[in-house]
Image (cartoon, rainbow, N blue to C red):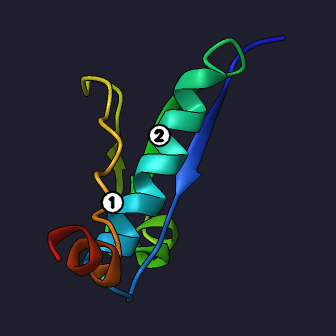
Amino acid sequence: MPKKNAFYAQSGGVTAVINASACGVIETARRHSDKIGKVYAGHNGIIGALREDLIPAGNRMKPLQPYAIPPPVHSVHAATN
């Protein structure tokens, strides 16, 4: 069966959340590269889909690095006392 392309659209929200969501879509597509060809994002979210204004997303990106999650503040405080 030929590969299918994936489409991703999101608008609104906190930038870090949007970036993490996009990262998840791109990384999942990479893990399933036997089934998923290219990943496209809609320019300005769903409006890009309606206008057929798509952006190639992640097709030539280096592997993404996981986010470093800082420890909770109370853990840092306990470790310094």
The type of residue carrying mark 2 is Ile
Residue 36 position within the rendered picture, expressed as x and y whole percent measured from the top left: 64, 25
The mark closer to the camera, 2 or 1, is 1
Q: Residue placed at 84% from the left, 11% from the top? A: 1
For the residue pair 67 and 38, the one nearer the viewer reads as 67
List x then y, in percent, for residue 47.
43, 78
Distance from disc 2 to disc 1, alpha carbons, whole Å, reads 20 Å
Query: Residue 32 placed where, x, y %?
Result: 66, 22
Specify the farthest residue to the left: 80
Q: Is residue 5 above or below residue 72?
A: above
Q: How many marks?
A: 2
Name the secondary structure under disc 2: helix
Other-residue count near label 1 (Cα within 10 Å), few / some / many at <14 / 14–19 / ≥20: few
Judged from this view, the residue extending furthest toward the right is 1
User: What residue did someone put label 2 on?
Assistant: 26
Is the residue 10 above or below the residue 64 in the image?
A: below
- Return the residue at label 1: 69
Q: Residue at x 15, y 71 (%)?
A: 80
Disc 1 residue type?
Ile
At label 2, counting other C-alpha atoms closer than 10 Å, the crowd grade (few under 14, some 14-19, many 20 or more) is many
